[in-house]
Amino acid sequence: MSFSPLVDRLLESLRVLPGVGPKTAQRMALHLLERDREGGRRLASVLDQALEHVGYCRRCRTLTEEALCSICSSSRRDGSVLCIVESPADLLAIEDAGGYRGYYYVLHGHLSPLDGIGPEDIGLDQLEARLDEGGVEEVILATNPTVEGEATAHYIAEQIRERGLRLSRLAYGLPMGGELEYVDGGTLSRAFNGRQPFLGE
Amino acid sequence: MSFSPLVDRLLESLRVLPGVGPKTAQRMALHLLERDREGGRRLASVLDQALEHVGYCRRCRTLTEEALCSICSSSRRDGSVLCIVESPADLLAIEDAGGYRGYYYVLHGHLSPLDGIGPEDIGLDQLEARLDEGGVEEVILATNPTVEGEATAHYIAEQIRERGLRLSRLAYGLPMGGELEYVDGGTLSRAFNGRQPFLGE
């Protein structure tokens, strides 16, 4: 059973959203049609504009509708550090955590030869150009702590090693607030290997 | 921290969808911008069209972009029964359950004097006109089993009583597949009061 062709198409279109199944799509469609047409119109219009205008920052490749994103166009960041992340969401998570004041470079993915995703697909040629600009002294390889993220970090490290920059990788260890007994073995052994001097008072 | 004004507006616009908080909105926006721009464009366009064209069926008031919905324009339904529901989602649930072959009437809400929602706001004047057409012999009051749904059912029953139609209400009782020990007291006492002759073989 269905409402009408157009409502059916709306239900189907809503399912492009991640995590939205048939039941949620129905709830969303009915909510917009029954209770918030104004909000729905705004969503349609903003979505259309965003898809039309939002592209990649010329310098760090994060999402922005400007030529340069707000971070790259800021002069108050530390130009000696460049943090390489897989996605704009990772960049956001680091910014939200606070503390980091350098610039970023967004890969939009990781190397995955089996899927045909090679160095150019994650912008490594452009990364070279970015480093050619000079000023960067340390590159932080903040790709995900997954097999693909590790491989990508290693590949990048290999590629830019001859530049003589300091290369670092985010620390592995226990997540804050977690309980030791629930931490997986791989993380636990990394935390042991990476143990640091205790600076209690 | 945020991406850019336009992406921020997209995050905010996505939050009109029910059940979508800041984190989900971010995941949706990044998914569309990073991985499915085509799907996003289709969503924006279909949403816009749906909000523009989908209105209420002239006869039963469910959602449709046609003058008459597919049920009301079907001649193979039983014109002697009219089922009154609060929302198009309720209509859909009854259709999906199968078995009912009559027509519907959608209130789009329930009486709620405190919120200023009176009989005209839920289309009761139009319901009278629908019944004036003739042919209906039984009205099933399928409003929700809530205080407001009950009150609305009683109000409608009172209003159309003089027409001498058969009036019925969906049965209260145990939900199928539930366990007695977890059924609430109100439902359980309704199930006792409404107990029916056992027709075991």
Image: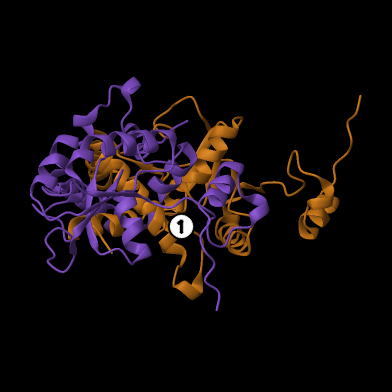
Chain colours: A purple, B orange
Badge 1 density bin: few <14, some 14–19, many ≥20, Cα 10 Å: some
Q: Quadrant of residue A99?
A: bottom left
Q: Secondary structure at mark 1?
A: helix
**Residue underneath mark 1:** B124
The one nearer the camera, A91 or B139, is A91
Label count reads: 1
Q: Name the residue rendered at 39%, 41% in the picture.
A: A18
Depth order, front residue of A142/B76? A142
Report x, y in % for residue B83.
Answer: 55, 43
Q: x and y percent of residue B20 in the render? A: 41, 54
Above or below residue B31? Residue B147 is: below
Q: Is residue A181 visible?
A: yes
Work out whether A116 lies above or below A198: above
Q: Residue at x 28, y 22 (%)?
A: A116
Residue at 53% x, 48% y is: A193
Depth order, front residue of A35/B179: B179
- Give amino acid for label 1: Leu
Quarter of the rendering occupied by the C terminus of chain A: bottom right
Q: Residue at x 61, y 30 (%)?
A: B99
In this picture, residue A31 sits left or right of residue B77: left
| Residue furthest right in the image | B201
Furthest residue toward bottom: A201
What x and y, as percent, mark residue A132?
9, 45
Check the image and report above or below for B72 versus B29.
above
**Chain under disc 1:** B
Residue B23 in the image: state x and y as whole percent: 40, 55
| Residue B43 shows up from this direction | no
Quarter of the view holding residue A107? top left
